[in-house]
Image (cartoon, helix red, strand yellow):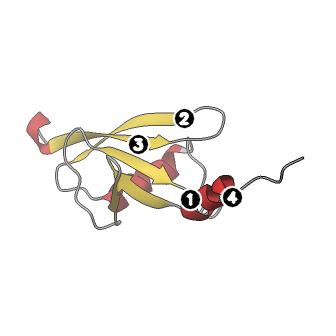
């Protein structure tokens, strides 16, 4: 069995429209994002990969499945944007018709 210094604790966050889901996982020190994804699937607390086209970030910085994890990291499960933020700003900034 590994001693305490050979384990890390990582938080996983998935923000839904209703309420965010956040859960901590204990992993071996040499773990990657892919390892925590395996644990997420097994936990059943998060939607499955088939249901959602996720991308990943660690503290807001884009991450790949091969990205190493460190103690205290926060892995964020991200959904694709529903609209282009630049286009949305352009749409809001267009002059409104005078009534």
Query: In the displayed structure, would residue 84 be above or below residue 25?
Result: below
Quadrant of the frame with the N terminus: top left
Label 1 to label 3, Cα distance in Å?
A: 25 Å
Q: Can you tell which mark lies on residue 20? A: 2
Would you say the residues marked 1 and 3 are in contact, meaning their CB atoms lie under 8 Å apart? no
Mark nearer the N terminus (4 vs 1)? 1
The residue located at (36%, 48%) in the rendering is 75
Instruction: Please report the residue visible at 13 percent of the width from the left and 35 percent of the height from the top.
Output: 4
* Location of residue 45 in the rendering, given as x and y in whole percent from the top left corner: 55, 41
Q: Quadrant of residue 86?
A: bottom right
Q: CA distance from mark 3 to mark 2?
A: 10 Å
Q: Which dot, 1 or 2, sits closer to the camera?
A: 1
Crowdedness near tag 3: few (<14), some (14–19) or many (≥20) residues, C-alpha within 10 Å:
many
Residue marked by disc 3: 12
Report if the CB atoms under discs 1 and 2 are less than 8 Å apart: no
In this figure, which residue is indicated by the disc labeled 4? 94
Q: Which residue is tagged 1? A: 85
- Mark 1 packing: few (<14 Cα in 10 Å), some, or many (20+)? few
- Say whether disc 1 or disc 2 marks the residue closer to the N-terminus: 2
Is 97 above or below relative to 21?
Answer: below
Determine the secondary structure under disc 1: helix
Q: Which mark is nearer the camera, 4 or 2? A: 4
Q: Earlier in the sequence, mark 4 or mark 2?
A: 2
Report the mark closest to the observer, 3 or 4: 4
Instruction: Confirm or deny contact between disc 3 and disc 4 (CB under 8 A).
Output: no
Taking the image as drawn, is residue 12 in sight? yes
């Amino acid at each position: 069995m590994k001693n305490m210094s050979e384990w890390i604790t990582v938080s996983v966050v998935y923000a839904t429209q209703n309420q965010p889901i956040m859960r901590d996982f204990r992993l071996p020190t040499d773990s990657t994002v892919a390892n925590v994804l395996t644990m997420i699937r097994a936990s059943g607390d998060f939607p499955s990969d088939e249901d959602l086209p996720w991308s990943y970030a660690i503290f807001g910085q884009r991450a790949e499945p091969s990205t190493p994890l460190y103690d205290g990291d926060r892995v964020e499960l991200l959904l694709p944007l529903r609209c282009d933020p630049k286009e949305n700003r352009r749409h809001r900034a267009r002059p409104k018709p005078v009534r």
